[in-house]
Image: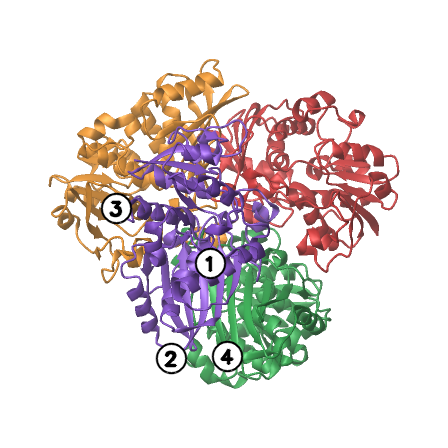
Chain colours: A purple, B red, C orange, D green
Amino acid sequence: MVKIGICGATGYTALELLKILLRHPHAEITVLTSRQEGEPHIGMVHPQLTGRLDLKLENATPASVAGRVDCVFCCLPHAASAEAVKEIMGSGVKVIDFSADYRLDDEASYTQWYGGQHPDPERLGKTAYGLPELFADDIIEADLVANPGCFPTSAILPLAPFLKKGMIDPLDIVIDSKTGVSGAGRTPKLPFHYPECNESISAYNVGRHRHMPEIDQILKRATGAAVECIFTPHLTPMDRGILSTIYARPTSPVTEEQLLETLRDFYRDAPFVRVVNHLPATKDVSGTNFCDITARLVRGRIVLISSIDNLIKGASGAAVQNFNLLYGFPETCAL
Amino acid sequence: MVKIGICGATGYTALELLKILLRHPHAEITVLTSRQEGEPHIGMVHPQLTGRLDLKLENATPASVAGRVDCVFCCLPHAASAEAVKEIMGSGVKVIDFSADYRLDDEASYTQWYGGQHPDPERLGKTAYGLPELFADDIIEADLVANPGCFPTSAILPLAPFLKKGMIDPLDIVIDSKTGVSGAGRTPKLPFHYPECNESISAYNVGRHRHMPEIDQILKRATGAAVECIFTPHLTPMDRGILSTIYARPTSPVTEEQLLETLRDFYRDAPFVRVVNHLPATKDVSGTNFCDITARLVRGRIVLISSIDNLIKGASGAAVQNFNLLYGFPETCAL
Amino acid sequence: MVKIGICGATGYTALELLKILLRHPHAEITVLTSRQEGEPHIGMVHPQLTGRLDLKLENATPASVAGRVDCVFCCLPHAASAEAVKEIMGSGVKVIDFSADYRLDDEASYTQWYGGQHPDPERLGKTAYGLPELFADDIIEADLVANPGCFPTSAILPLAPFLKKGMIDPLDIVIDSKTGVSGAGRTPKLPFHYPECNESISAYNVGRHRHMPEIDQILKRATGAAVECIFTPHLTPMDRGILSTIYARPTSPVTEEQLLETLRDFYRDAPFVRVVNHLPATKDVSGTNFCDITARLVRGRIVLISSIDNLIKGASGAAVQNFNLLYGFPETCAL
Amino acid sequence: MVKIGICGATGYTALELLKILLRHPHAEITVLTSRQEGEPHIGMVHPQLTGRLDLKLENATPASVAGRVDCVFCCLPHAASAEAVKEIMGSGVKVIDFSADYRLDDEASYTQWYGGQHPDPERLGKTAYGLPELFADDIIEADLVANPGCFPTSAILPLAPFLKKGMIDPLDIVIDSKTGVSGAGRTPKLPFHYPECNESISAYNVGRHRHMPEIDQILKRATGAAVECIFTPHLTPMDRGILSTIYARPTSPVTEEQLLETLRDFYRDAPFVRVVNHLPATKDVSGTNFCDITARLVRGRIVLISSIDNLIKGASGAAVQNFNLLYGFPETCAL
């Protein structure tokens, strides 16, 4: 059994992670941390877990957690996460980091998009990016995995095969994404107050979302193409799910069947990518680790559509997939 | 034109009030207050009002507001509201108070249910309760109207006719109410964070909701019956609307048709009560000042069902209905 | 491996059943039937199952199904289900019937509430009712299990302990239930068309719902008490979940702590009943086989609140729980 | 008073139309038609109208309607609508047609996109397109107005100013639209069954939606530019609202402020277009006739975002705006 610690266990990604790990035959949830006062029982914070996990939240330091477990899932906010990871690394514990801290290529990008100094800059650009469909070899060797952003997962998976084969123009990519509200986290704020966002859809952070450079850089890392995408996220009145509708320009004439075939070829052995003929809906993948993808050709332009559950394939499911690779368990275990 | 001031103009009831007053031929919205920093334009706080109302929010005192208007709608939290009202009254300005401060009979009730000292106890029990269907005579004479609670409106209207005629047992009344989330106000809190309350229904404040004594006391005031109800509110995943399902025991055998006829008789001249044969849905009254009511007889027990829009008939629509009575406009004006 | 056939595999309960059985270590899904034209692949009907189950829907007779499997889950409409069950029984195959056909005590009740002749009246009143918390002994011995109705499960579990101990008046029980829309099945009809039922709550079938006699009769079977309940279901704008708020009168004075203790005692060994101190929400049990229950005392009246997922504990989860008992697997297997 | 007939009064657009006309000081709703059996009272079909309009639905012919009214709003399905319009025109009655029958330029387009023969081809290309912001002169002169499609309204309004000034490439326009479910009409079908489309977003009719040629042709009519857009609609889990996110390529370098200024200039006198600095949400315009528009510049690409209420500015509000122009009432009357 691999002993597991989760730093920052009060949010939605931690909840989903716990639900998956509870059915994982090789994981033993051992420590949960948070800065909640009074060290409440986890069931007080997540009523869904009542009677299923008998642990209290501890206000423990990363070092103290590292001393008691084999693997840490770090669900802390950015910057706080790198502080914790820096403290843990080297102790022999493996870390899967949910934050954005280790996803970007370099310190300059980090400072530009996240502000402030990176607490642990020397690991930037050298950390495995936890998208097993593209970086399994890196992940297997890693001690630290940067778990991908939810939007990047939904955009990189459909785009990578075409960029790798030079089939689309890397400078003419529009990614129009729609996300459920859980993507905004569990801290109450006005835009996510039910009567504000229910029965409404709106774009946010247009041209300024931090996942835009992540998409560019990871696509370049995976395919060599110098991508510059236009990325627009939209807040959609639903709990979970991301649908990304992607518009790309082919470098030479192509048929819809060739598009689908390219996807099928690329993901032939990927257990969690389903290349489908129908138009995917987020409900089709809700609660699962699947990414459904299809392709259409419209007036000579390529339209790629992908759907994921932002909390599973977009966060905690991917994290367990990475965990399975790190420890040599079957990739689909518990997923 | 009646000059209007609104104290506490940032919430949902104020927004609905503004939308109604904007189409009222005799109302001129003159002052809006809030404690928001920087005195923003009202359109910054309520984007729905962009281009429709050219006023800034002012951090003005109640006295300063009273000096510039004829009528104040007070949308402040309880206690703060009575402080403001106390300051305004006597200046010749009429006040419609959305808070609970003047609804209960006496200071003891107030302290028991709301805590603390009432800032203006001498007006308790002497203030008109703004349910025109039952208290129109009081309202017409009043300078201060206590606008009813949303749940009480949905419960009192169906029950009053039967209590007045002694047709039901006042000590065996169960009120099971379901409300949309806007009833909780606009301040972000975890229970109203979208991913918490969406796709979920739950009871809250069981046996402890402050509208329970309001229902008892107002029903007694209206009908003479010493009511003691069991009241259970439920948070329902929708923006607005209240459905109350009420279970009562007849004092002597009765038919369903007699129940409906009693309601129809009682509300024959009430423009906003619709006694219907079908089972009402909250959607039927959404955005309107109607209260739809029906009755059923089930195994000898009376089941009354009412639906209102909690923000309109349950708050701002009722307030304008009261305003119309206060100033002698047609009761349905702008509604 | 137990070979499984599912008759009527296109609805929501069949979908959830398939998702559970796919992770069941001792179940092999073998035959799926429906009257769909063209015998489509199951993934065409349930896109969620794409790539997870390689079976086509067959327009097969019950007898033909029975010849190929060990256990049939019958998800057909009432009457059609009893026709099928009648045909299957005796062939050595065990049957779990999702319809209401075998839940009531006798033919007269069936005809009164469901209309028409019962196709298989001699099994009425002799079939195990699939609520393992109350009828495990019957179920273990059975060849045919009548899987409970969703509302009855949510009402019987909280009420049974108190009726069994004579703590509440069996003739003064009000059950106010709220259900998600999936409870209405998958056939498109106007009341369940999204813009009709979204953002709205309403009661339906008041005093006429077929689950009312089921609750009465099963509670009598389980506790000996001659129950006559008032049952009101409400259509709630959410996919899934049932919350039942139940009002009962104690036969002698009781405290809230005694109420909770009675529940805890009764369900000490029930793996899927969680007696909780907090007020349960349907989201707490969504996607799980749990029934959360609490109790409150309000002005001397007992208020019981229960929450289940109508498609899991209210249908397919309970069915697999029954399956586990029928075949001697751990009761919680795959749940 | 202008006497009004509505052909096809059972759908959502007719309901919204009725609600607007009920408050219109110069409209008298006189005849309502539908093929509903039994000629039910309108309140039976639209419970929201209970007690507000005392009319029955009649199974009347267009000619019979025309004989009794001054103006017909035709809410029939395509083809059926043109049949009715053809019958009515020439009788002196003015018609506002909600269908797509008179929106396209020519018979060939109609047959390509809608199939079948157009019942009234000679009026194609000569009918006023009811977007007053662009075609007020035509509308004022017209006897027949083709009320615009909902998506086209949301796309044409933001694009027209830039196309007219040659500021964007007419062949590089991507329109990614998100619509509430009421856009699909009131006929129950599986994709719009609540548990199917709730908590899910998906694209539909990718590259094949009939509003794509309408956008192209009307933009050409309004601006002279030979547009060929990529249009992708998405079904969003909400009752109403359309958000269109539009990606266009500038023909020469431009600033964000120039984009906003171009919009402000163009719509300076349009009472229902609000050019806003913030990112519009569909909720901001829900229940109103406004179209909110903003512009952003992202990596040199133009992103335009518009929001409308699909049933108001996208249908019935626009229709009344056209009605006001046709009869010389203030453009904003009742809106």
Is A88 located above or below residue D288 in the figure?
above
Look at the image and tell me whether residue D74 can be seen. Answer: no
Whole-number angstrom distance, CA of label 1 to CA of label 2: 58 Å
Q: Which chain carries label 3?
A: C
Identify the amino acid type marked 3: Leu
Q: Which residue is label 2 attached to?
A: A253
User: Where is mark 1, residue-wise?
Assistant: D38
Disc 2 to disc 4, C-alpha distance: 18 Å
The kind of residue on which mark 2 rests is: Pro
Q: Residue D228 carries which label?
A: 4
Same-chain check, marks 1 and 2: no
**Between tags 2 and 4, which lies in front?**
2
At 36% from the left and 33% from the top, the residue drawn is C152
Q: What residue type is labelled 4?
A: Glu
Quadrant (top left, top right, bottom left, bottom right) of the N terminus of chain A: top left
Frontmost residue, B302 versus B9 = B9
Image position, residue C128 (x, y; %): 23, 31
In the figure, is residue D191 to the left or right of D315?
left
Relative depth, front residue between C100 and B48: B48
Identified at 84% across, 34% down, the residue is B87
Q: Mark 4 lies on which chain?
A: D
